[in-house]
Amino acid sequence: MKNCTIGAILLPVFCVFTNAQSLKSPDGKFEMNFQLKQGVPYYNLTYNKTPVIEDSRLGLRLFNNNTVQFAPEIRKPEDVQYDLSDRFTITAEKRDAKKETWQPVLGEKKNYINHYNELAITLNQASTDRHIIIRFRLFDDGLGFRYEFPQQKNLNYFIIKEEDTEFDFPTDMKAWWIVADYDSQEYPSQTTKISEIPARWSYGVDKHSSQTLVKDAVQSPLMLKKEGKDPLYMNIAEAAVLNYPASNLEVDIKNFKFKTHLTPDKNGAKGYIQTSSVTPWRTVIVSPKAEVVLDSKMLFNLNEPTRYKDTSYIHPTKYMGVWWEMIIGKSQWAYGEPKTNVHIDGTDFTKLIPNGKHGANNIKVKEYIDFAAENGFNGLLVEGWNIGWEDWIGHSKEFVFDFTTPYPDFDIEKLNEYAHSKGIKLIMHHETSGSATNYERWADKAFQLMNQYGYDAVKTGYVGDIIPRSEHHFSQWMINHFYRIAEKANEYKIMVNSHESVRPGGESRTYPNWVSAESARGTEHEAFLGNNPDHQTILPFTRWMGGSMDYTPGIFQTRLDYYFPGDKRFVKTTLAKQLALYVVMYMPVQMAADLPENYRKHMDAFQFIKDVAADWDDTKILSAEPGDYIITARKAKGTENWFVGGITDENKRSYTVDFSFLDKDRTYEATFYEDGKDADYISNPQSYRIYKKLINSKSKINFNMARSGGFAVSVKPVK
Amino acid sequence: MKNCTIGAILLPVFCVFTNAQSLKSPDGKFEMNFQLKQGVPYYNLTYNKTPVIEDSRLGLRLFNNNTVQFAPEIRKPEDVQYDLSDRFTITAEKRDAKKETWQPVLGEKKNYINHYNELAITLNQASTDRHIIIRFRLFDDGLGFRYEFPQQKNLNYFIIKEEDTEFDFPTDMKAWWIVADYDSQEYPSQTTKISEIPARWSYGVDKHSSQTLVKDAVQSPLMLKKEGKDPLYMNIAEAAVLNYPASNLEVDIKNFKFKTHLTPDKNGAKGYIQTSSVTPWRTVIVSPKAEVVLDSKMLFNLNEPTRYKDTSYIHPTKYMGVWWEMIIGKSQWAYGEPKTNVHIDGTDFTKLIPNGKHGANNIKVKEYIDFAAENGFNGLLVEGWNIGWEDWIGHSKEFVFDFTTPYPDFDIEKLNEYAHSKGIKLIMHHETSGSATNYERWADKAFQLMNQYGYDAVKTGYVGDIIPRSEHHFSQWMINHFYRIAEKANEYKIMVNSHESVRPGGESRTYPNWVSAESARGTEHEAFLGNNPDHQTILPFTRWMGGSMDYTPGIFQTRLDYYFPGDKRFVKTTLAKQLALYVVMYMPVQMAADLPENYRKHMDAFQFIKDVAADWDDTKILSAEPGDYIITARKAKGTENWFVGGITDENKRSYTVDFSFLDKDRTYEATFYEDGKDADYISNPQSYRIYKKLINSKSKINFNMARSGGFAVSVKPVK
Ligand SMILES: [Ca+2]
Ligand SMILES: [Ca+2]
């Protein structure tokens, strides 16, 4: 609220604002209150008048002032006089509201609704003659806010020492979290109370190719649940993380409070900012229903519409890959003996002694093409096609890969011709080994090669420590790198599916050719240290909140002793659960990751993977509880076909699907894929049963899910 | 020496070497002795049986071992067990010799002679099953040696913690040095005893745009003189610094010893090495005559012949520039108000308020073209032509410059047309502000633009802290950057003249399109804190040893109060000395740096700059003493014309030139440019006299040089 005195004509309006403002959500259930306490900004949030977030501090600390040179300055101690965290007065407020419907290029629904009330508060710091804006958007599913730095006389360039945004919860809550790290997101989910996080933190750590852990902190997105008689589900995340590092969350177990912890570069700098500039949005999604959290499109809504002129080349992809056999150790990426010291600009790769296990060879790739084509896939990923794999990891090699030169046994021209003749596009693979500078230098030539041979999609990878050696995977420079590559790929009409890249925050609205990303612990870890049975019931609440994941499901041969007698590794799900993942997990880029030989043994079950859609007109989260189960129904793009998937954690469960979401005037033929009666993810994962049935909108069908089991249904209207 | 036992057929030869080897120079005057003392390698050097370098240690310390991953490993303490510095035995020695004559593309002489005896010693470290080679080459003017790391089972990848090569001198000596720094070479020369370096070190420091000083250490090349009745001049430098950082020298004042100190990245890593690999050559040039040191081509000889297929586009360049007027503050690089916050991808530069002082405008550039063309120059540098200068420095801006978009008042097409119509080529300017990543991304487009408009030379600049922010100007990554740019420029047939780049070590033999570099304190500093009167008598003994410098001489209007009444700055030479610099300083890229208006007032003196050659068939160092004077005669390429230049320090001197180097059968017309009788670099710098005279090989002409004065002579055969 403000009191303004209008002076004489031509004089400015002088306003005195009270130190508190409030904002309500369109449905009136949420209220956000902003206030200054002794010049320090705080916000809180209530839902149905119940405190969700208590007064929580806002602000940023900077390195020194903005008039001195930067790089010397980050060697100096910070100067608190220049922090953007206190000594503020409110000098303006601006309110706005929006309700728009927009269409994602690829998405879970035909229309996404962006509906919010907005409050933008201008904070003036008289002592430094600077002002910033904090912009709040309150939706019916929660709050988003960010800092904005208008260009002005005394605010042009600065380096962020830390962003101190807090989320202070009134009570202890259940939390689904992974350990904070500047370089890896591929940690197993932990489920504890907030108050238990530090004590349990080290249980969440395992060894990765590149990691820089932040002790006792956790990653964003973070899923929370206030348990008890009025449960409330909450999700803390960030949206539109552009030209800014990704954030972690420090935990304060006495106050049940989290504080933003940005990813620094190796100078300790957390963002080199030139105004005008904005931070990512900090988001809190809140609902009494877990399903509403899963269904939230808030992170996408907080991103800008795309500026791409042409998005027609972006399409859903169902693909297979010469990949899982390398992951499990049956074949290899390298052509010569791995651990051979090679120079991409010096070694004659035709003279290497072949190791005899190179996966990306002409014969094998043709076999995969044949199988993928026979079964209606449109893409085939081939990893290990290009020179440099012999010693690609762990040596801080900058010039590690050549992105245009195939190994001697990979005939790029002939294989692409063959693939195209069968209706398959090969999917390019660009592993960078973390050497982003090398990849940037190759990018144009690499994408030109793709255009030449008709590749329209690339899987990128960033396994290993980053070069430039000042950077982390999630520091500002690398965030910019990822979007630079997305934009360059768009110039060549190429879709990007990135691995080991930063977790998304809805940016696919703006960069729709960045169609998917890994950025979490995917199926590959089943062949390393394993994923817990509840892993897939948590990821949609965390990693998936900001965009699709390339989880690479579809493993039918879950026990690896099939390949290697005595091998104790196994994929910790039933076969039926693998099918359900194609519905539960939103994946416009959908891999059937297992080997053709394994699918051939279960062509009846494989039929579901062949049938399931990858792009959707509608999505219904039927029932969900993080860490326990998720049941989802989706309607395939441009059709009346529905697909339903259900998964459970390490506990058996039964669930009755109410098909009332179906069109009331139609009859459908449903095909059910269910765990067998004796199915069990450890002792009998391949036990399943398949049956068909006519159903309609009144049908209610009960499913029994085995331990780490699931079910899948494909539903087609009867003509 | 070795004793070999030849075993049965098919068995290897077993050799036992003594722990000491020696090598003599072709003329027998130098002897290098190598030995292991308890497994630690040492070398020494004698000249005429007098010790020049006493037993000095060799070797490298590494981070940890070579089997572990790199980046984590540089966070760990070093593991001495893996150092390549001790526990060695000699397992092979190989001797070789060479005498070749080769022709530099541009050079001081038509032929360079490469004449040495070589000894390569293989050192085995049994405890780690590794071996390295130390290769020594002994020339008639001194010693070069390097480490070589053959690819082998246990030596494939390592990170250098430090190279510990020592130069241990028997006595205290006079030293000409600048302070060690990882980012700047533009320090004033200091002249002290070795033993006085630490005490005087801080006198050598002034403020630079980017600096990371190494306390008490000095830079290489370092000039030394053993004074007394048998004086000996010595120069420590390095050659072929490729894929390796540049080095500084730590001083041990008790032992008169220097130790190599490599430039690290910000992780402290001093070189990421993959075998096979070699280090730069460490060089010691030694002679009783200073002139022989100046004349040495050892650093060039230690580089590899070029692999460029075409060097025909590389030519000597005499150029003027829209430059000095910005340096002194008369005009500006920026078009809009400097310190305006601009975004190269967002700001509309046509809408900026012009500051009215932008140098690179159509009218001024045409005036420079006219004057340069009238006076026979072939190039005109224009700085400040491209967008981004408003806030280019000090903000750690990565996306700081656009290298293809001119300011609104610079019509690139028309100006190039106009220049070409007058026989002038514009010289491109690429200031990077230290943002090497930005420049690499632009490089192709920038060079394509140059090809499009007919530019064949670029002046690059690296003012400011380096991006990637892990790097220093002289760390391994940046060294690779500089050569990457040179090679890319060669693809476009473009010559490079780099500023703020690494000091050269003879690499122009391999990369002949990298025609010149600044890489030391040039004329521009006369407009900042000033150069000492002896500065130009020292640089040829230090900075110039490895390649030409773009010193940008030719300032006739030495007093800056001419422009700005009361201004105390002045160029600390006489006008005649400025002329002499064109001969004393080897510059195939030769700038006449002053403004046309100043040359117009002294067209008689300017005639020497118009006449003087920039490429040479022969060079005679007539007389020289570092810090005091240099007198040099050079014969212009493909002609019988000679040019002589002489300079002195803050002391008046007279010198009699003996013209016996002239052809005995010819008569020559000589034009003499001499300090006036009352000339003085402070009180009367523009006093000079010019006269002509017929001379022959018997002529001996005396010159009087004023304080910080000099003389120049142009000598042409009479037809
Ligand atoms: Ca559970
Ligand atoms: Ca002197």
Image (cartoon, coloured by chain):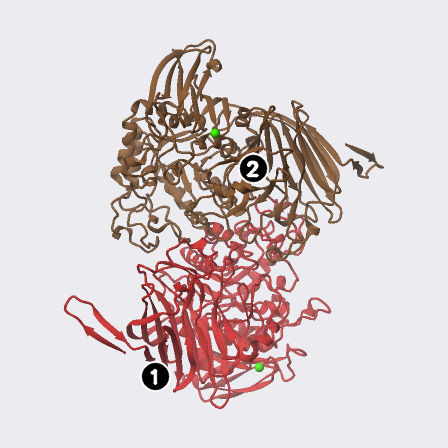
Chain colours: A red, B brown
Q: Is residue B287 above or below residue B487?
A: above
Q: Residue at x 80, y 39 (%)?
A: B12
| Residue lying at the far top of the rendered structure | B665
Q: Residue at x 44, y 44 (%)?
A: B206
| Residue lying at the far bottom of the rendered structure | A229
**Residue located beneath label 1 in the image:** A27
Residue type at numbered disc 2: Ala
Circle 1: is it few (<14), some (14-19), or many (20+) Cα within 10 Å? few
- The quadrant of the picture occupied by the N terminus of chain B is top right
Residue type at numbered disc 1: Asp
Q: Quadrant of residue A508?
A: bottom left
Answer with left or right where residue A306 lies relative to residue A671: left
The Cα atoms of the two marked residues, 2 and 1, are separated by 71 Å
Q: Is residue A226 above or below residue B137?
A: below
- The quadrant of the picture occupied by the C terminus of chain B is top left
Q: Chain of mark 1?
A: A
| Residue lying at the far left of the rendered structure | A9
Of residues A672 and B534, the one drawn nearer to the viewer in this rendering: B534
Circle 2: is it few (<14), some (14-19), or many (20+) Cα within 10 Å? many
**Residue located beneath label 2 in the image:** B240
Residue A531 in view: yes
| Image coords of residue A495 (percent x, y) | 45, 61
| Image coords of residue A60 (percent x, y) | 41, 67
Q: Secondary structure at mark 1?
A: loop
Of residues A570 and A702, the one drawn nearer to the viewer in this rendering: A570
| Image coords of residue A642 (percent x, y) | 46, 78
